[in-house]
Image: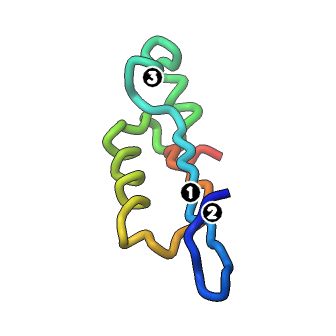
Amino acid sequence: GSGLPVDDGVVADATCLVAPGIVAGKMTEGVFDKDAIKTMVPMQRPGRPEEIAALVAFLASDEAGYISGQIIGINGAMA
């Protein structure tokens, strides 16, 4: 696989996976009604695309340079 070279020939995998829950948009319109979302999502609303984008932008930034190999759920506290 690909990765970032580290000292002594070790390679660190810098891949992270973003796992969104229900996100407002054309793909979810008509699939989940407001009452279903309130039942399924502890935060009682769908995520906004810009919230997902903000997480991805952070993960791509230098500030997230020490985060590696994680699956990050962004899902309104859905289990």
Q: Height in image: 13 above or below 73?
A: below
At x 62%, y 72%, the residue is 12
Residues marked 1 and 2 touching at CB (< 8 Å): yes
Toward which corner of the image does residue 50 lie, by quadrant? Answer: top left
Secondary structure of the residue carrying tag 2 is loop
Sooner in the amino-acid sequence: mark 3 or mark 2: 3
Q: Residues within 10 Å of mark 3 (few under 14, many from 20)?
A: few
Toward which corner of the image does residue 2 lie, by quadrant? Answer: bottom right
* Left-right relation of 55 to 71: left
Toward which corner of the image does residue 29 lie, by quadrant? Answer: top left
Q: Which residue is mark 3?
A: 34
The image shows residue 56 at horizontal and vertical percentages of 41, 51
Residues marked 3 and 2 touching at CB (< 8 Å): no
The amino acid at mark 2 is Gly
Sooner in the amino-acid sequence: mark 1 or mark 2: 1
The image shows residue 5 at horizontal and vertical percentages of 58, 75
Q: Which residue is mark 2?
A: 69
Q: Height in image: 53 above or below 71?
A: above
Q: CA distance from mark 3 to mark 1?
A: 31 Å
Mark whose residue sits in front, 3 or 1? 1
Nearest the viewer among 59 and 47 is: 59
* Left-right relation of 15 to 47: right
Instruction: Determine the residue located farthest toward the bottom in the rendered image.
Output: 8
Q: Which residue is mark 1?
A: 16
Instruction: Determine the residue located farthest toward the top in the rendered image.
Output: 30
Q: CA distance from mark 3 to mark 2?
A: 34 Å
At x 40%, y 45%, the residue is 52
